[in-house]
Amino acid sequence: HAKQAGKHRFVFFSERMNHQVRERLLLKNNLRQGLSRDEFLLHYQPKFDSRSGRFTGLEALARWQHPGRGLVWPSHFIPLAEETGLIVPLGESVLEIACAQNRAWQARGFPPFRVAVNLSAQQFRDRDLVATVRGVLQRTGLASNWLELEITETVIMQDTERAVAILEQLRAMGIRITLDDFGTGYSSLSYLKRLPVDCLKIDYTFIKGIFSDPQDAAIVRAIIAMAHSLRLKVVAEGVETEAQRVFLREQGCDEVQGYLAAMPLPVQEVEQYLA
Ligand code: C2E
Ligand code: MG
Ligand code: MG
Ligand code: MG
């Protein structure tokens, strides 16, 4: 009996697997076409000063307006773009859209703010990253101090020496660097000290546990204290409740980002918000 149930389960499982594999393959094959047809767009999520509540800038988050599937979220296509190498041209396109958009907002008279763009490890391994970023800034006319780049710990762990050299060049241009999803990787404190970054963004998994898991609260406190003693700014991502915001403010976290204050918004809604 057990054997039979197991067998059925296996059949069901393998059919589902097949379906998922096919879906992935379909999306993967659509990526290149999507890129050439400009189907990728950005939503923007505001960040705020945790003390004053003042708006401090936006993070650009990629979305895929797929002709047959509607709006596809990054967890469904960023890994595929990484597997196929298309993350490099996609990343450049995202960077260009974000910089052009920010320049356009400035030209229309909105008070200037930074826009943050996520970079994947593969873009970071690309020899031309610094030249690509410089080229995008030149083409769009955005001053480099209005651009922020978010990278994860994995980017740095793969080749620390190279990463440090590239980050130094980007920072010398005036770009702000943030270490995203902080706490989920294996950063050692000794290299954090040497890393040319401006800001740590505490991963949302720790924020989620602030009131349910005393260890998460302890980790959040420790990250804030460590960041400040290294003279880095700290941002919390995934802030969903007022209680979390109050806790973070009391612990001295500099900025907050999350559904509590604002979702990632399409351009039109960002503009309503900014106005
Ligand atoms: P991330 O950079 O850590 O971005 C934060 C993610 O948390 C976003 O998911 C955002 O929509 C979501 N989020 C914001 N506030 C809250 C909240 O209060 N609660 C919860 N539960 N989630 C919140 P999204 O847009 O699905 O992006 C997921 C990840 O995909 C990003 O994580 C980033 O690693 C990657 N990604 C997005 N756009 C790009 C891109 O243009 N290039 C690259 N390389 N990666 C990107
Ligand atoms: Mg990010
Ligand atoms: Mg993050
Ligand atoms: Mg994250």
Image (tube, rainbow, N blue to C red):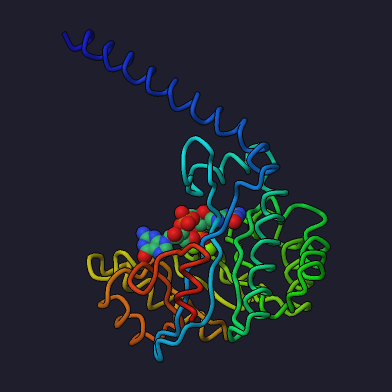
Q: Position of residue 225 (x, y in %)?
A: 45, 83
> Which quadrant of the structure image shows residue 57?
bottom right
Depth check, front residue: 171 or 45: 45
Vertical arrangement, residue 231 with respect to residue 178, above or below? below
The answer to whether residue 206 of the structure is visible from this angle is no
Q: Position of residue 245 (x, y in %)?
A: 32, 79
> Which quadrant of the structure image shows residue 261?
bottom left
Residue at 49% from the left image edge and 28% from the top image edge: 23
Position of 220 with respect to 145 (left or right) is: left
Depth check, front residue: 4 or 159: 4
The answer to whether residue 167 of the structure is visible from this angle is yes
> Which quadrant of the structure image shows residue 246?
bottom left
Q: Position of residue 200 (x, y in %)?
A: 53, 73
Vertical arrangement, residue 146 with respect to residue 71, above or below? below
Position of 235 with respect to 248 (left or right) is: right
Q: Position of residue 41 (x, y in %)?
A: 58, 54
Residue at 46% from the left image edge and 42% from the top image edge: 70
Position of 262 with respect to 103 (left or right) is: left
Residue at 77% from the left image edge and 74% from the top image edge: 141
Residue at 43% from the left image edge and 23% from the top image edge: 19
Q: Total of numbered circles in the picture?
A: 0
Q: Quadrant of the N terminus?
A: top left
Toward the left, the furthest residue is: 1
Vertical arrangement, residue 140 with respect to residue 37, above or below? below
